Image (spheres, grey):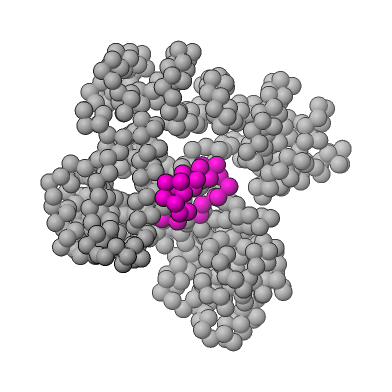
Amino acid sequence: MKNHFCKSILFVLTLALATPVLGQQDTDVKYSNGKVLLQQQRYEQAMAEFLPVTATGNTYAPEASYFYSLAAFKAKKYKEAQEMLQQLKMQYPGWAQMADATYLLANIHFERSNYDEALTQLQQLSTSALASDAASLERFYLQKLTDKATFERLLARFPNDKVLAQAYADKLIGTWYRPENKATLERLVAKHNLDRNRYLNASPRQQQGFDIALLLPFQLNQELSQNARKNQFVNDLYAGMQLAQDMMQEQGINLNLYTYDAGPDTATVKRIFNLSELKQMDMVIGPVYKSSARLASRFASNTGIPVINPLSQDAELAPQGSNVYLFESSVATQARQAAAYAYTTFSPKTAVILFENTKDDTTFAYFYKEHFKKLGGKIKNYKKISSSQASATASTFNNLNLTDAGHIAVFSEKMTAAVNATSKLQASAAKLPLMTYNSWLNINQISLRQLDNLEVYFISPKFIDTTDPAVKSFRENYITRFNIPPSVYAYAGFEMLYFYGSLLQQYGSDMATALQEKGISKGALYPAVGYTTRTSRNELKTDNQFVPIIKLENLQPIVVNTVY
């Protein structure tokens, strides 16, 4: 959930950026450089700049100590981060932002599996403005804890911790349940005023697990070789789900998966939806084809059972109030989120937009333009191109007037457009931000070094951080079990089942309430997943509202719009 610093720290960073230069020029320069590097997510370089400023007696020593720790945390150098925070708490106990340092120290202890120390730190925040954030952080890490003995030891040491008690109760009504646990549940419910109906009247079915129907085009009636070629994406999706199922079982959440072969034939899909057993499910994932969208919507509406479309980016398949949700971000959401990032980040608030003469690119550009204007931005140039006409495309880019433009957006996957756009910027506006598709990273005619040297931002809805320990672990487990590396569909299958399975455990089948309260948070493998708008948690959408925007730094992709 939260490898993050909270809103108040955003304020601290903003305030620090405005701090006037004081006497010790070298110290001030290093402090200023460190803040810039931290904002650029160049964490190890930031640590090197901040470290000399942390010395006792320096004007910015407390702030530098915190920012050093934050950079070390982001770089996964937990030992260095912890030692600096402990020094900060000892030397500057009255620092105004000490609550943020305490929160970060708790996060570090959780990452290092030091649960006692983490809870000790969080207890210091129980009456602070960060109390709610602290509870969310604790809930996230305790959900991942799979050792029952550790839970029992923590409960004995922290008997008044309601979040801890509720997390343990959630485990007990899952696969950890034994008849002898009933007295423990009764005690926890009484002491912490937990929901009696949920914890004391849990049905045997809930204790046995949650039932999820998978309506996917396995196409089992085809020859094996033909099926393997055409439907590898389904096999990968299902394989990822199987690994998520195993992991969740280790965490005390039992998910029962029931597969149904649901291809493009609507008569077959209708027959499946009419099966009495399907009305006993807690959730349905699929079907994937647009031809069955109306059947899925009718089923979800009539039964109250949420239906998840695992692959589509078409918002029309999940209208508001239908109880149907897209796991992916819709095309409209991708464009709007990219426009929102551009408006917030780039100055001046003017855009030059070029787009390919195709339906998809025209649609994407339209949503981008309209949202940028809605936020208050101005469109300096809005032009359609046809990359099949190479000379005309080159002329269009060469004649672009980028004066007073805050950024340029190019929505085309064609090599001709990408080469002309980068050439234009290299020649006349190397520092002008460029917003485009992630597919440009795979265009052989442009090197990663060229893209790194420019200010290019890539819209990357399926981004996976291969340096993340959880992603590395998943990849290793996947290869061990299936003897092939995971595809994007395998990652999606894992993330999907883990995300929705966790919601079923916590909220049951009331998906609207679950998604509303969950908000946007870090995924198991994805940078983040969530269905509420980032401007108002009260506005629930039916598609994933987090769209990663990435940028190359030292040839490595980093997410620049991270959810903290």
Q: Is residue 208 left or right of residue 80?
A: left
Q: Which of 150 and 295 is in front in this view?
A: 150
The residue under the point 20% across, 49% down is 301
For the C terminus, the image quarter is top right
Q: Which of 142 and 94 is in front in this view?
A: 142
Residue 516 on image: x %, y %: 37, 41
Q: In this view, does 114 lie above or below 266?
A: above
Residue numbers of the magenta segment: 463-489
Q: Which of 209 and 155 is in front in this view?
A: 209
Is 482 part of what is drawn in magenta? yes
Is 247 part of what is drawn in magenta? no
Q: Is residue 343 left or right of residue 239?
A: right
Residue 246 on image: x %, y %: 37, 39
Residue 224 on image: x %, y %: 29, 62
The residue under the point 51% across, 52% down is 464
Q: Quadrant of residue 92?
A: top right
The residue under the point 41% across, 74% down is 359
Q: In this view, does 101 lie above or below 340?
A: above
